[in-house]
Amino acid sequence: MSLTPLTARFFPARGGRSLLIGMPEMRQSSLVVVANRLPIDDSAAPDGACEWRRSPGGLGSALHPLLRHTPAAWVGWAGGTGPAPRLPDIDGVRMHTVPLSPEDLRDHYEGFANATLWPLYHDAVEQPEHHRRWWEAYQRVNRRFAEATAEVTEPGAVVWVQDYHLQLVPGLLRDLRPDLRIGFFLHVPFPPPELFMQLPRRAELLRGMLGADLIGFQRAQAAHNFAQLVAKVLELPATDRRIDVGDRAVRVGAFPVSIDTAEMAALAARPDVAARARRLRQDLGDPDRVILSVDRMDYTKGIEQRLKAYRELLAGGHVKVPHTVLVQVAVPSRERVGQYQILRDRVEHQVGRINGEFGRVGEPAIHYLTQPFDRAELAALYRIADVMAVTPLRDGMNLVAKEYVAARVDDTGALLLSEFAGAAAELPQAYQVNPHDLEGLKQGLLAALRADPTDAMRRMRAMRAHLRDNDIRAWARSYLSALDDGDSLLTRLTTAG
Ligand code: ADP
Ligand code: G6P
């Protein structure tokens, strides 16, 4: 790959301060991933001793195993506010930081991305808010990402833009760099027209996405929703596979994201992880049945509904402490957004109430943990879970469900899975439930707890076989070959790591 030193400095759209002060030269890359968040945080950055930080969240979990030791670059935000820190390469991947000011953080990230788009795209399970100031910030920050990307991308290279924070970037980048091959992938659901139509700036958002050559969604239904909206709002000829924008054809498709199945299986099989799992089970008091849930603290994850179902099962005497325990991991997320603060308070109130009513000294009904864990600890947790309860109200994919299946190296265990997780389409052998239906949720949980071992093993084997063939590399291969007609970049990317 040719490395082209750049002497030009890059200036933001407003404020006049160099965005990339301290970057004496900038090299260009042949594959550039653009995502709101870099896989590091600002606390790790300043001393140069950076490591990948797999912050809780599916996007980072998906891209991390793919990009390590590849010629890729990543354009993103390093967390925090203020000037962009200069970062060294991490595992060979170049990190290009885009700064956010306190106003950008409030109005772009917490506002338009996470209080307008996020709830709207997840079935409006919380009320989306609309503010003109947030839209201005969204445009401003998208422009900054597009300009930063244009600077660091080789002529004719591939740029892969990720997720709902950056829907305008494909269009802005195409204007700046028509030579690039541009992909866009949405990790979250894309809503049906009746919801999307609520957005005051719906036409601009659709036009922004159409700057891409290939627009990828998790599910075919999302591609269908998108095509319908483009036809209705922009009056362009659109099918679920192709949209004609002037003389350009934009391809559309479903590419369900996945995990590094082999890596998770190998981790779960490690003797130290097995020993850690035995220890964890002892620490839980050697219960007959362990139920596990692992979520970001997000109202889309159905944590309150699940706790309510568990409480009613305890109250009805269907499950008993200490024979059965629930381990709920809920790592805090987007903590300054009001809806997330309210959720955390409510969940913690519920956990306290259930433990107060049904726990005993040294024997809580729920073991509630809010810490981020490393991958080995997560694998050990998956190994002790007789039942993994993954019951979101709506989820683009849900990689936790896939990680659990991959970690069940002895083919035991039962996955309780919401019909409204993208993963449900791929894992029909899971015990599927409608998380809005409290009785159904309780019955599903009981069915998973009481599963016949032979039947459970048959289900688990089928799910494991699916994930072996449909792992993260298969995802990247199918997406990038559709985007780039399968050149050597794709081969390097999907065989590395
Ligand atoms: P989302 O992207 O909405 O957070 P996913 O289930 O797709 O949901 O992805 C969550 C990712 O975050 C998974 O890879 C999971 O392992 C990771 N994760 C969740 N909770 C924790 C935690 N407490 N510590 C470390 N990683 C976590
Ligand atoms: C989901 C989104 C990602 C996001 C992640 C964590 O997976 O699709 O784009 O990065 O959640 O959320 P955060 O707000 O912490 O980046």
Image: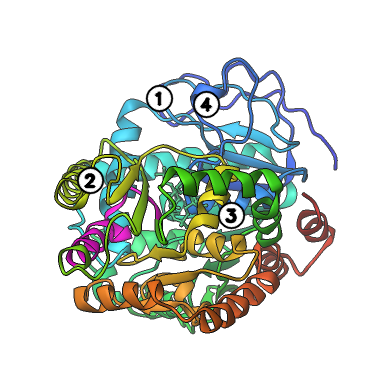
Q: What SS does tag 1 mark?
A: loop
Q: Is residue 66 magenta?
A: no
Decide: few, some or many residues near mark 4? Use Cα within 10 Å; few <14, some 14-19, many ≥20: some
Looking at the image, do the residues carrying marks 1 and 3 touch, with CB atoms under 8 Å apart? no
Residue 165 position within the rendered picture, expressed as x and y whole percent measured from the top left: 42, 49
- Return the disc, 2 or 3, that comes first in the chain's sequence: 3
Asked whether residue 137 is in view, the answer is: no
Say which residue label 1 marks: 81
Q: Quarter holding the N terminus?
A: top right
What span is colored magenta in the figure?
Answer: 293-312
- Horizontal side of 346 relative to 164 (left or right) equals left
Identify the residue under disc 4: 11
Q: Does the image show residue 29?
A: yes
On the rendered structure, is 83 left or right of 22?
A: left
Place of residue 473 in the rendered image (x, y in percent of width and height, measured from the top left): 70, 62
**Residue displayed at 40% across by 71% down:** 416
Residue 360: assigned label? 2
Q: Is residue 2 left or right of residue 354?
A: right
Q: Nearer the viewer, residue 201 or 56?
A: 56
Name the kind of residue labelled 1 in the image: Thr
Q: What's the residue type where badge 4 is placed?
A: Phe
Mark 3 element type: helix
Q: Secondary structure of the magenta portion, mostly?
A: helix
Badge 3 residue CB within 8 Å of ligand 1: yes
For residue 62, the mark is 3
User: Looking at the image, is mark 4 or mark 3 nearer the viewer?
Assistant: 3
* Some atom of ligand 2 lies within 8 Å of the CB belonging to the residue at label 1: no
Upstream in sequence: badge 4 or badge 2:
4
Crowd around label 3: few <14 · some 14–19 · many ≥20 (10 Å):
many
In this rendered view, identify the residue nearer to me: 190 or 432: 432
Total marks in image: 4
